[in-house]
Image (tube, coloured by chain):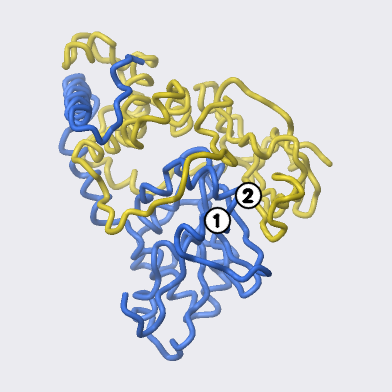
Amino acid sequence: MNGVHDMGGMDGFGKVEPEPNEPMFHTEWEGRVLAMVRAMGAAGAFNIDASRFYREALPPDVYLASSYYKKWLLGLEDLLIDRGYIAAADIAAGHATEPAKPLKRGKFTLGDVERIMVRGKFGRPAPAPAKFKPGDRVRARNIHPRTHTRLPRYARGHVGVVERDHGCQVFPDSAATGASENPQWLYTVVFDGTELWGPDADPTTKISIDAFEPYLEAA
Amino acid sequence: MSDHDHHHDHDHSDLSETELRVRALETILAEKGYVEPAALDAIIQAYETKIGPHNGAQVVAKAWSDPAFKRALLDDATKAVSTLGHVSRVGDHLVAVENTPQRHNMVVCTLCSCYPWEMLGLPPIWYKAAPYRSRAVKDPRGVLADFGVSLPKEIEIRVWDSTAETRFLVLPMRPAGTAGWSEQQLADLVTRDSMIGTGFPKTPGAPS
């Protein structure tokens, strides 16, 4: 979706301001939100792509005005309601008022913590041979999916070169909606700064994205 | 989405409202039998104690000290890191990218906050915020200037936008004046920002 989360190349957000000695969490609730998202995901309520999609789908003014973990909280509530794990009435009451819905992998318990500290595996067997190889010139397609996609707007329509092949991986555009993993080949595609940002751009910069095969066409 | 969420998050009243909302959600999840509250405590504790830039720093120091490891790291970082017993287990699709006198690498996630957690810990706020995400791909030299970093004009800057589940770790250049240093001494020079590409390792002998 063409949301405000797709920020690459936007102007007006000001300087980057590193915070000296930044704590891991600024308030206690931030850690609780992170933990709930990880636990409910691991229990099978949703995958990482769906959780990203729900944060992106927050209204643009809310997205921009909310802190990082506030976005996580709002996205988590919406996602759990839409998938039927909690009800709006539960939230309004502040406790469970509706019956639970069984989780795919059951209750998240202490014994599950260690396994979620290692990232999941996203590589999958290839359903078809790769269409591109390192060195190929490709154009990022001019597509505007209404749902989740990992093709940033700034790359669309532009020509780059395939630099690396990462094998076949879960396709976020499909996985985010709960449809299927629909594995696709994934490539690092590198663009000249001037190709993306025009002749006035710094000629010494190159920018790469990791692009799934359906995002690309031969150029 | 309800309308009363629009206050800025640093506002005190909003903080307490958010806190109440988080507690309510946790109560609901526990009452429905979805999560064990102690497991949430354990997740937070694991993030606070097990991951962090010290993991990445050990990998970088090893690469500076051992040419065979460096080659293996650049070839397949997941595989290479998994051979180091003292570094936490690492997931698939880790890619190490090497800074050279000709090229400086910098990592961003313009779409959200993708970051090599196992190597660097949770990302700092600036990495997740709009100024960095918007400008890193269009004006990387300007972003580096915000960090007080300036590179010669002829150096290529390569920005890696983490748009998939691939995770990037910058391998900075080994500082001069460190011949004969142990891996642990070298690891102490490796900063988090030098592994994101928004900074350099510390200089030997300089105050940290």
Q: Which residue is mark 2?
A: A166
Q: Is residue B180 left or right of residue A163?
A: left
For mark 1, name the chain: B
At x 34%, y 35%, the residue is A67
At x 51%, y 51%, the residue is B167
Which of B141 and A72 lies nearest the eye of the viewer?
B141
Q: Which chain is yellow?
A: A
User: Where is residue B37 drawn, in percent x and y?
Assistant: 16, 33
Which of A210 and B72 lies nearest the eye of the viewer?
A210
Q: In the image, is residue A42 above or below residue B83?
A: above
Chain B, chosen colour in render: blue
User: Where is residue A102 drawn, in percent x and y?
Assistant: 30, 18
User: Where is residue B81 drawn, in percent x and y?
Assistant: 45, 64
> Which quadrant does the N terminus of chain B fall into?
top left
Q: Which residue is mark 1?
A: B142
For mark 2, name the chain: A
Q: In the image, is residue A55 above or below residue B56?
A: above
> Which quadrant does the C terminus of chain B fall into?
bottom left
State the image quarter where residue B159 is shown. Answer: bottom right
Q: Tell me the kind of residue under disc 1.
A: Gly
User: Where is residue B155 drawn, in percent x and y?
Assistant: 65, 68
Which of A195 and A131 lies nearest the eye of the viewer?
A195
Q: Which mark is residue A130?
A: none
Q: Nearer the viewer, mark 2 or mark 1?
A: 1
Q: Is residue A174 left or right of residue B28?
A: right
State the image quarter where residue B83 is shown. Answer: bottom left
Q: Tell me the kind of residue under disc 2.
A: His
At x 55%, y 77%, the residue is B68
